[in-house]
Amino acid sequence: MNLVDEKDEKPTRWEKCVEFIMFHFRWVFVVPFLLPLSFLFNTVFDFRNRIVHAVNSAPNAHVRKVKHIQEQLKEWNDNGRKSKLVNARPGWLTMSFRFPLYKENATKIATDKLFDILDLDVEKMTVKAEPGVTMGQLSQYLISRGYTLPVLPELDDLTVGGLINGCGVESGSFKYGMFQHICTGYEVVMSDGELKNVYPDSDNSLFFAIPWSQGTICFLVAATIKIIPCKKYVKLTYKKTETLSEMCEQLTEDSDRNSENVDFVEALMFNKEKGCIMLGEFSDGPDTHDEVVNPIGRWYKKWFYTHVEDLINKKHESIEYIPLRDYYHRHSKSIFWELRDIVPFGNNVLFRYLMAWMCPPKIAFLKATTPNVLRKLYDRSHVLQDMLVPLDKLEECIDLFHKEVEIYPMWLCPFYLKSQPGLMKLRNATHKMYVDVGAYGVTSKDGYHHERTTRRLESFVRSVNGFQMTYADIYMTRAEYAEMFDRTLYDWKRASCKCIDAFPDIYDKICRSGRR
Ligand SMILES: Cc1cc2nc3c(=O)[nH]c(=O)nc-3n(C[C@H](O)[C@H](O)[C@H](O)COP(=O)(O)OP(=O)(O)OC[C@H]3O[C@@H](n4cnc5c(N)ncnc54)[C@H](O)[C@@H]3O)c2cc1C
Ligand SMILES: NC(=O)C1=CN([C@@H]2O[C@H](COP(=O)(O)OP(=O)(O)OC[C@H]3O[C@@H](n4cnc5c(N)ncnc54)[C@H](OP(=O)(O)O)[C@@H]3O)[C@@H](O)[C@H]2O)C=CC1
Ligand SMILES: CC(C)=CCC[C@@H](C)[C@H]1CC[C@@]2(C)C3=C(CC[C@]12C)[C@@]1(C)CC[C@H](O)C(C)(C)[C@@H]1CC3
């Protein structure tokens, strides 16, 4: 592993030694302390949510919480709009590696108190949720009632507010698009305290300006999201691919959104040539006894990505029935493949049977307790990037990722992008199939440099009309950002809704210097 950076801050021998110990023995703290704490937190929060649903107290509490936000904004206006407005959600709770610096001298608005599901409307087929509601909460609530979100991003702790004001993709996205595309309405509070209900047919410019805006236009206080009926299982077909071009051709063919038998498409690359495409279909379960049911979410089961690699090493194609909720959160237990660095024996059979019922550790707790020494190490040699590129540029993109970072597994998730006004407006097509190429992990590639390498990746992504996910480290300049994202509607909306003196500019929130 590339623990030392030749060009920048060179760690001393002593620092290298401390880094080594912290990196390889982080589990000494994580296993006995963070695992039980995470388990306890989840149990208590789950219990609290059940009570809230049982007594149906969320809708009334919502009105109170929104009033409080409006009062905060009124006070800020009365005091002369002196500082910028941000969400009060603390940095350690958010799903990114960095802590926001832009929050330090800003006025913090209490949207972080909004974390309840408000209403399930089975006639209109929508669910209304506050922005702090997590994907784990929604999957548990909806699936037990026979419904699901068409796009339900995998990590349990991702929130509705973050996925709308940031963005979200998942294996249902090849059919339904990004998380923003399954939203039918937003309830927002503007900087002057006005509460608005925003729909595509009432206030369409604001409706399209909100996704990806990072909370720099208004505060989201609830979202109405489409639901679809679901079945108990996903029938998952694993198909091995043996070359990069086979992967690209096959994935393009399989990402046909009109296909009736496919509801989920995702792929993993295990090295530059070997990969696996996984096609899922809602199912009531196996018809015969000799078909495999694999509840991959159970504590003693292998980490999903290792299970996939084992399967394709044995057979070219296999089929399994996976309980729906286990399928959605298939990458949660191993935090994609990040947990292998934190708890190296986490996939060991003994550990799985004895301790893994407390897994995974909460990402927020890990983040809050990451020592500075480790952050420096991660800064130098850890890659976290999701690049969204047109599917027809996938081969070029994987070639480049291989040349620059060579991190496997690599996550490939096709998604349908229709041209709508807003930051993600397509410039030369009405709709197009894109793919999210995700690289997460420590790189040992010679010549890797966090800034220079990321800039080369960003430059490629811009050249193919792609987009970079904004939770990751972004080294683009302001002008380069404006080349990647279409700011026309965003800037107009910021000017017409009096946002310019109220919220930071989006670039100042997502650029590397805005985050620690
Ligand atoms: C529903 C709605 C209502 C609106 N109402 C108003 C209103 O009432 N008043 C108002 O002033 N504005 C309004 N806007 C704002 C609107 O976004 C812009 O004013 C509008 O986009 C003007 O440009 P256009 O549609 O003619 O061009 P567009 O095609 O939208 O192009 C505008 C921008 O797209 C980028 N672009 C396009 N093609 C390329 C390319 N090939 N390469 C690089 N960049 C490219 C450029 O940055 C360009 O400036 C509204 C927007 C929406 C979506
Ligand atoms: N599968 C996927 O698609 C995955 C996506 N991600 C990324 O993680 C992020 C989501 O993480 P999460 O922790 O849930 O969210 P965050 O707290 O990181 O929020 C993301 C952005 O949304 C803004 N925001 C959040 N809530 C509101 C609100 N109620 N009103 C206005 N703005 C709001 C935040 O503003 P502020 O800075 O003021 O707090 C922030 O800029 C997204 O950016 C997503 O792209 C990560 C992993 C997987
Ligand atoms: C579009 C998709 C699927 C994105 C997946 C992104 C995840 C892999 C990211 C989101 C948050 C994330 C950056 C995180 C980390 C790993 C990768 C994560 C989970 C970790 C846990 C790595 C170890 C670090 O010490 C620390 C705990 C700070 C972070 C926290 C955030």
Image: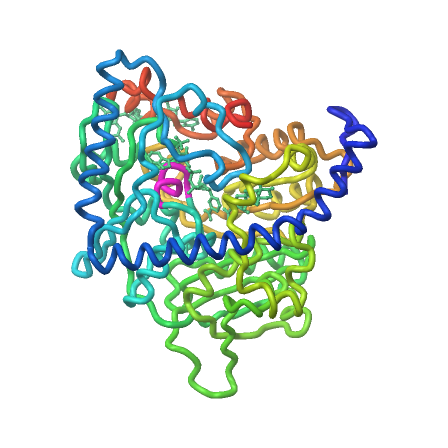
Looking at the rendering, in which quadrant would you find the N terminus? top right
Magenta segment, prevailing SS (helix, strand or loop): helix
Query: Which of these two is toward me, 486 or 499?
Result: 499
Q: Is residue 349 above or below residue 198?
A: below
Q: Is residue 220 above or below residue 108?
A: below
Question: Residue 471: where, in percent of width, then height?
Answer: 49, 37
- Which quarter of the rendered image does ligand 3 occupy? top right
Question: Residue 336: where, in percent of width, then height?
Answer: 57, 53
- Whether residue 193 appears in this view of the structure is yes
Q: Is residue 190 above or below residue 250?
A: above
Q: Residue furthest bottom?
A: 289
Q: Residue furthest right?
A: 13
On the image, which quarter does residue 377 sit in? top right
Question: Residue 268: where, in percent of width, then height?
Answer: 59, 57
Question: Residue 356: where, in percent of width, then height?
Answer: 57, 63
The residue at the point 45 percent across, 56 percent down is: 171
Give the image's coloring scheme.
Answer: rainbow
The magenta segment is 160-167
Query: Which of these two is toward me, 61 or 263?
Result: 61
On the image, which quarter does residue 306 sit in? bottom right
Drawn side of residue 29 relative to residue 365, left or right: right
Is residue 162 rendered magenta in the image? yes
Is residue 264 rendered magenta in the image? no
